[in-house]
Amino acid sequence: MEDSKFSSPLLFKGNSDSHGGSSGERSSSGGGDAGKLRESGASSATSMVVLSTLVAVSGSYVFGSAVGYSSPAQSGIMDGLGLTVAEYSLFGSILTIGAMIGAVVSGRIADYTGRRSAMGISEIFCILGWLIIALSKVAWWLDIGRLLVGCGMGLLSYVVPVYIAEITPKNLRGGFTTVHQLMICCGVSLTYLIGAFLNWRVLAMIGVIPCFVQFLGLFFITESPRWLAKIGHMKQSEVALQRLRGENADISQEAAEIRDYTKTLQNLSEAGILDLFQWRYSHSLIVGVGLMILQQFGGVNGIAFYASSIFISAGFLGSVGMIAMVAVQIPMTTLGVLLMDKSGRRPLLLTSASGTCLGCFLVGLSFVLQDLKEWKEITPILALVGVLVYTGSFSLGMGGIPWVIMSEIFPVNMKGSAGSLVTLVSWLGSWIISYAFNFLMDWSSSGTFFIFSCICGFTVLFVTKLVPETKGRTLEEVQASMNPYLTQE
């Protein structure tokens, strides 16, 4: 979904979390004020971190605006260009195909060109795509534009959270990385709102604005120190780290950790897709891929794409339901951002998964009562409450945390291949659910939501048994605990 402070989650000298002993010695030996200054610089959000975050999540907003575009633009495009339902369905769904293409190459591009360059490449795709859509006269030009935007989205969905995680101090990493999901929600919601008043061509042109914001902003932010270290530019890595932490911050310990960990990984070959399936990487791979599968197969895209029809089939006014969803989604995502580095990843994931399980169960129950013709006055309200509980709970944790954890658990030597695979799995799951949802609803509305509820319930068990808590730990500590074979070598 990856900004400056995100890229160095290592411990710094003077940061008292895991190495409090040395920090304490330094303070007690007469360097108290300097130690406090160093600790403050290491744990606070510097202006460079904030700027880098804002630039990176401009790409997340692009992601959200692309997802939200097809709904408000549908009637205008179909009337203006004379598209059939099938032709417009192709236009809407080809975005996901493009995202899968972008996901396949995302890790390699980010590893070979750098995190900043990868974001710049993605925005070139998005700018071209939006302009083609805005100027289209025939259906196939629309599809080409939408495909290009999708390719940019697939790349952004990987590189943004990875960049943020790599530049942020450990005590801020979770919250900053989750801003990626918050901006996606804002992009979707504001595009819905703006699209209600503007022509579809104007709406596409507006989509270009955040693309240019990020593209131009990339010239003012620093590259990820970890990526610079990975390619052997140690001096540049330390310069970038100093910019991120502030000129008065002591970065010696964090820089040393990055340097030592990079040297360890240099003894290992760059992991390809097939290399990911070695036993040494099994825990990271199971957690990363598993969370993405459970996130998508819990029904999020089916509910998000067809929420209006769900409300209507349950006997509720669709437009009111959609407004209520937007009103719940952004505040709950914001709450998740604020709690990420306080409560931790696991408690938020467990709460979120439990809430989505309950929400799907309530919607399924409303359809059962509707079929039985019982409590007719209550079933629409029950469906609304269920969807809102699901939406709020998903926004709290399951929407953003899998991307945070994905950016934290893979070693640098396999992050490109693993990130591409995990992102591809996410987009493939998204396409499967969005494609199959209407068929499932035709089969059984209540059964569909009870299946989603069971999957969300299984997510609780998965998180309990397999997902590590990464709050307050450096990336090196997280990766060493999940991949002990690497440090042994």
Image (cartoon, rainbow, N blue to C red):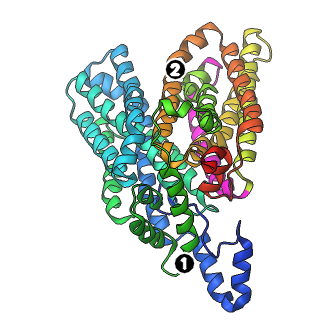
- Pointer 2: residues within 10 angstroms few (<14), some, or many (20+)? some
Please tell me how many numbered marks the rendered image carries.
Answer: 2
Magenta-drawn segment: 313-342
Along the line of sight, which residue is nearer the eye, 428 or 254? Answer: 254
Along the line of sight, which residue is nearer the eye, 444 or 171? Answer: 171
Mark 2–mark 1 Cα distance, whole angstroms, equals 48 Å
Quarter residue 220 falls in: bottom left
What's under tag 1, amino acid-wise? Ala
Quarter residue 393 falls in: top right
Image position of 101 with respect to 401: above or below: above
What's under tag 2, amino acid-wise? Ile
> Could you tell me which secondary element the residue under label 1 belongs to?
loop
Q: Can you see residue 195?
A: no
Residue that appears at 62% across and 7% down: 443
> Could you tell me which secondary element the residue under label 2 belongs to?
helix
Along the line of sight, which residue is nearer the eye, 390 or 83? Answer: 390
Q: Which residue is mark 2?
A: 432
Residue that appears at 55% across and 69% down: 45
